[in-house]
Each structure stands twice: as C-alpha cells, then as structure tokens.
Amino acid sequence: MTDTLSTVPNFGAGHPSEPVIAHLLGQPGVQRVPNPKVAMFIAKRFLDPEFSRKLVEQIDARRRPSTIADANGDYAFRTSETCDLDVDDPLVMELKRRIIALTGLDPAHAEPMQGQRYEVGQEFKAHTDYFEPSGADYEKYCSVAGQRTWTVMLYLNEVEAGGVTRFKAIDKMVEPETGKLLAWNNLRANGTPNPSTIHHAMKVRAGTKYVITQWFRERPWGW
C-alpha cells in the first residue's frame, strides 16, 4: 500500500469492475466478502491509529449537518454531521494516494472526500450510494460525472456501542474498527445500479463514530 500514483494501474471509472477486483485481491491484507450479490472488500488496519486520530481532529474542526439528495420527506433519515475535507491538506492528499494505490481507480473520477461524525442516537437510515435513475434529482447529480461506481469507506475509531454498518440484502454487519477500510462496487457487472448494496449506518448507542467516505464516478468529477 505504498505505491505512488504513477505506478498504479489506472482502471478509469471502475467499470467494467473485473480489473479493479483483481487489483484489490492482489493487495496485501485485502479480503473479499463472500457473497455473490455484491463485490465488497475489507482491509483491516489500512490506517494506523495516529493517522486515524489526525483525521478525527479534522472532522471535529470542520463538521456541519449532513445533507441528502432525496430523503422522501423523512427529515430524520440522515442525522449525522459531515466534514468537507480540504483537498490541499497533506494528510488528505496522502489518504487519497493510498486509496488510489489500493483500488487502481482514476483519481480524476473521485468526488471530494468527506468525513462523517455520528453522536449517540445519530444514524443514516437504509440507503444506496448510487443515485436512483428514476429519482427526481438524478439529472441534477449525474448529468456531469455520471453515476457513482465505487464506494471506499474508512472507519477511524472503535465505537463503545452501536454504529454498525448493516448490509441487509447480504446479511452483513461491519463493525467500526480503527483504520479498517471497506470498499464496494455500487453497480452490477452489467453496469446497472445494484440494490443489494443498500446499507444502514445504524444508531450509535454509546460513544462517537467517525468515518471517511470516498466515492468514484463514471466520468471525471466536475460540478
């Protein structure tokens, strides 16, 4: 995981997904979640505790209420806080470099990286990361860069109780652990959105939960 960007194969947007999957499986410490419905991977200890702690500090310093494209009138659908990370910050640049080295995805297709903070009682109800093609906001969010392809999520700390990410369709619960990386393809092999990626950031019952999210798009990022 110490490759430089110049030595990493560039798989563009990540579709087709087979080269990305092969690259991920070739990285040390990466395990595939054994479920045929979703291409999902876990790498424990992707970040060391000190790196994670510094990212937590940035989230605490720059957090704002989280937003959502379409909550269908449920204003408690997403109750966390979000941090828009500074793309020019050396720590953020290094994190992105490591993510690109791990996945082989094109950094030009990456959205601006975000951090999320969940206090006791906060959650993000069951949702998918892709934009629903029939949704009212699909054209607004996908007209330039296209659909979301891959999600890379990093857990920055252990949570005293709760805060699990639940993938109901594949019966998978991912526990927050300091430095753990979780990556999945939001699309099926044929390029259509994969509803089996629906997931729920479950309520924190004790402590505080911190995560980083990096999304990738079909086309280079632009807004």
Image: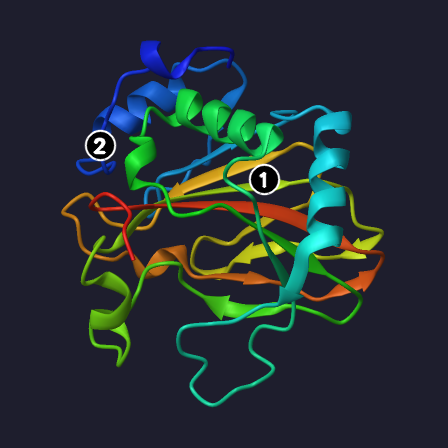
Q: Alpha-carbon neighbours of circle 2 within 10 Å: few (<14), some, or many (≥20)?
A: some
Q: Alpha-carbon neighbours of circle 1 within 10 Å: few (<14), some, or many (≥20)?
A: many
Q: Is residue 187 left or right of residue 54?
A: left
Residue pointed to by mark 2: 12
Q: Are marks 2 and 1 in contact (CB under 8 Å)?
A: no
Residue type of the residue flagged with mark 1 = Leu
Q: Nearer the viewer, mark 2 or mark 1?
A: 2
Residue pointed to by mark 1: 154
Mark with earlier residue (2, 1)? 2
Q: Position of residue 8 (x, y in %)?
A: 33, 15
Question: How many marks do you count on the picture?
Answer: 2
Under circle 2, the secondary element is loop
Residue type of the residue flagged with mark 2 = Gly
Front residue of 86/14: it is: 86
In which image quadrant can residue 136 be found? bottom left
Q: Is residue 161 above or below residue 45?
A: below
Q: Position of residue 78 (x, y in %)?
A: 58, 73
Q: Quadrant of the C terminus?
A: bottom left
Q: Position of residue 42 (x, y in %)?
A: 52, 32
> Is residue 199 something one can see in this rendering?
yes
Q: Residue furthest bottom?
A: 73
Under circle 1, the secondary element is strand
Determine the residue positioned at 71% across, 61% down: 118
